[in-house]
């Protein structure tokens, strides 16, 4: 059976609370501890942190969630991913630097990332800033310039793992229950077999299915899911 991939990505507004850790509890606890209790002076000394793992393991979710938490605490964040064609200069007002999709950086992005990293940890900027970065590969295997690759591995490094099938099933049922949806085993199996299995895509699919069921006033079934796909 051909597996369909939905280009729908993560749902907007990821938070640390909405991250389902599975085997990634240590990474999640590390980020929470680094963020402190919501006050700038309660944060731990910012040691560079690098997250790596295959697509769909939650790297971008965590970087976005940390960025939002810092903004809620009154901070500002520098953000760089592979879609940013013209990176800005380092800003002394930043609380932290977020470097996402580092394995995809071109020459200009690598130069900007290195500059941001050096400025973030330099005593010249006053208090060191946190550098939180993520990529698909461990630091030593990244296809980057040597000085940037070595620095990404300076601090704490965590490998993120995909949720296994039982964990994905449990998360789908939990999220569906929170929405007041009863998901049958048939619907859950159809979603896992026929669609992209990363959790962000599955959560977005569930949200679309919920909205479609409300609009059509029908129970969530495999035929309803097929009908929804035919109308898109």
Image (cartoon, rainbow, N blue to C red):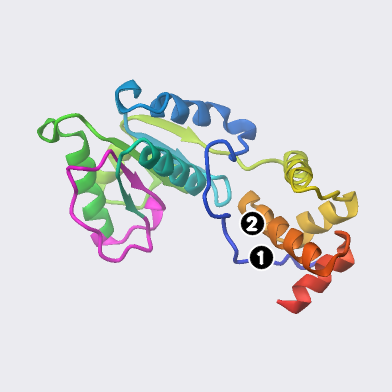
Q: Nearer the viewer, residue 188 or 76?
A: 76
Quick check: 6 left or right of 51? right
Q: Residue at x 40, y 24 (%)?
A: 36
Q: Quadrant of residue 49?
A: top left
The reply to whether the magenta stretch includes residue 161 is: no
The residue at the far left in this view is 124
* Residue that carries the numbered disc 1 in the rendered image: 5
Quick check: 159 left or right of 3? left
Q: Residue 45, which numbered label?
A: none
Q: Quadrant of residue 167?
A: top right
Mark 2: secondary structure:
helix
Of mark 2 and mark 1, the one earlier in the sequence is 1
Mark 1: secondary structure:
loop
Q: Residue at x 19, y 29 (%)?
A: 127
Q: Is residue 88 above or below residue 130?
A: below
Residue 9: % across, % down: 57, 59
For label 1, the crowd category at 10 Å Cα-Cα, with few meaning under 14, some 14 to 19 and many 20 or more, is few
| CA–CA distance in space, label 2 to label 1 | 9 Å
Start and end of the magenta stretch?
A: 81-108
Q: Quadrant of the C terminus?
A: bottom right
Q: Is residue 223 above or below residue 28?
A: below
Q: Quadrant of residue 194?
A: bottom right
Look at the image and tell me whether residue 197 can be seen. Answer: no
Q: Nearer the viewer, residue 23 or 215?
A: 215
Q: Main secondary structure of the magenta part?
A: loop
Marks 2 and 1 close (CB-CB < 8 Å): yes
Residue 97: % across, % down: 30, 43
* Residue that carries the numbered disc 2 in the rendered image: 201
């Amino acid at each position: 059976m051909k597996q369909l991939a939905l280009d729908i990505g993560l749902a907007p507004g990821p938070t640390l609370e909405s991250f389902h850790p599975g085997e990634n509890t240590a990474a999640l606890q590390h980020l929470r501890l680094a963020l402190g209790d919501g006050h700038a002076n309660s944060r731990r000394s910012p040691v560079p942190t690098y997250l790596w793992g295959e697509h769909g393991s939650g790297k971008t979710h965590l970087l976005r969630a940390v960025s939002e938490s810092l903004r809620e605490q009154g901070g500002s964040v520098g953000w760089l991913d592979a879609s940013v064609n013209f990176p800005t200069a380092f800003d002394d007002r930043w609380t932290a630097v977020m470097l996402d999709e580092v394995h995809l950086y071109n020459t200009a992005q690598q130069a900007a990332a290195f500059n941001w990293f050096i400025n973030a940890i330099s005593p010249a900027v006053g208090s060191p800033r946190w550098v939180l970065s993520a990529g698909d590969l461990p630091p030593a295997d990244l296809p980057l310039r040597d000085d940037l690759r070595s620095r990404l591995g300076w601090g704490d490094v965590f490998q993120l793992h995909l949720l296994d099938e039982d964990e994905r099933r449990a998360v789908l049922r939990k999220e569906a229950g929170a929405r007041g949806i009863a998901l049958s085993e048939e619907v859950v199996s159809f979603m896992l077999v026929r669609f992209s299995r990363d959790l962000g895509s599955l959560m977005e699919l569930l949200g679309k299915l919920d909205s479609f069921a409300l609009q059509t006033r029908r129970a969530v079934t495999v035929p309803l899911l097929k009908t929804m796909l035919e109308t898109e």
